Image (cartoon, grey):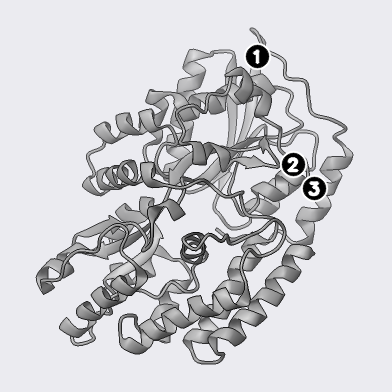
Amino acid sequence: MTHAPGRVLAAVLLMTLAGCSGDPSPTGTGNQKVEIDVFWWGGEKRAELTEQALKLYTSRHPNVTFKNHWQGNQGYYDNLATEAAGPNGPDLFQIDDNYLTEYAERNVTLDLSPYVTSGALDLSKLPDSLAKYGQVGGRTVGVAGAENTPAMVYNRSLVKRLGVSEPSVGMTYEQLFEWATQITDRTDGAVAGTMDPSADYKALWLWLRAQGKELYAGKQMGFTAADLGAWFDMWKQARDSGAAPGAAVIKEANGGDVTKQLVATGRAATSFMWSNQLPELQRGTKDELALVSYPGDPKGQWARASMYWSVFRGTRYADTVVDVINFLVNDPEAGKILGTERGLSPNTDVRKVVGESLTDPTARATIAFENAITPRFGAAPAPPPKGHAKIRTLLTAAAESVQTGAKSPRQAADQFLNQANAVLAG
């Protein structure tokens, strides 16, 4: 998700720093009546499930109640920054990797490392890469509220109708293009074989990792203009061969709107998405959809937090808030309530319990896919640096300039690298 708090964020977070001279000393609440302020983004369904889970916590800890407030994605970070600037910011809040590093570097988030060391915050059932993906500068500053994984969603019904083999884990991009061309040819161009994800940062990131590189190297981009030019050129060739559709069709899906993804609208046989989006995509088509990993060795992937729970550094109830996170992440009953709305449970044991309780076949397929692929993942990179949201926007613009023919792959790559490194240096 992309948000743009801009100067407001910087100003209010600096105010936060001015009012915080040091981390609070965690103290137990005993029988003291405590009200925990919780803030998250999402829709009504997420709110309903989150409130149910928190009510379960209160039923076990009657001295702890919750003041819940939530809103849609738009403007969430502006409001979070404003609240965090005051003395009574939300004790517990939801954050994603667009802003985790920025909030941690500005000391808005509480360092949870002592709780992990003591065992009060148990991350032992999280995949190692998922637990580490909540660390900034060696400190645990966020705990995954859920996991999602990049997945190529493909139209299984169409593939079977056309007599084409299904895509497989570990296939190369060259093999994908050969496969996709069969789809395009056998539908006389009515359905392109694959979406072109050259504007998709996660597709680029996994492609780079397969070559031993990263999207970021500290506060600069982790690859060269030649690397990005090769990525853009690869997809230009896919479009030229008919494996991928033209620019106008691709642009429909570049914004990320699930309802406009080509595998759901019938314009392509694949879309490059997150695995937990399968149920929503499935609602857009009567054909059966299925999941496979992105092309390349799965070790390029890692268990990624779809979002984190973080603790406000100024909270008066650190012990209790951390215990709430521990409950949301590790309690099987809480896991069953939360389901897969945020993604899959980060706790692999809880995920199995949740999977057994689900009746939706697409939700079950998502869990089965992640359980099968997670053991093949590689190590997690550091969470993206400050400026990640802006860089995602720049990448989309660069890719679209190549898709439309306005720039050559290398011209677009040179411009992007200059702009992106300027953002990271700012």
Identify the residue position indicated by label 3 in the image.
Answer: 13
The kind of residue on which mark 3 rests is Leu
Quarter of the image that includes the N terminus: bottom right
User: Circles 1 and 3: CB distance less than 8 Å?
Assistant: no
Is label 3 in a helix, a strand or a loop?
Answer: helix
Provide residue 2's location: percent of width, then percent of height: 59, 61
Task: State the image quarter where residue 34 is shown.
Answer: top right
Residue 147 or 219: which is nearer the viewer? Answer: 219
Mark 1 or mark 3: which comes first in sequence?
A: 3
Going by the picture, which residue comes out furthest to the bottom?
406
Q: Which residue is mark 2?
A: 84
294 versus 116 height, above or below = below
The residue closer to the viewer here, 180 or 362, is 180
Packing grade of label 1 (10 A; few <14, some 14-19, many >=20) is: few
Residue at 23% x, 84% y is 190
Residue found farthest to the top: 31
Front label number (1 vs 3): 3
Residue sitting at 10 percent across and 70 percent down?
161
For the residue pair 381 and 157, the one nearer the viewer reads as: 381
Task: Write down the residue under mark 1.
Answer: 33
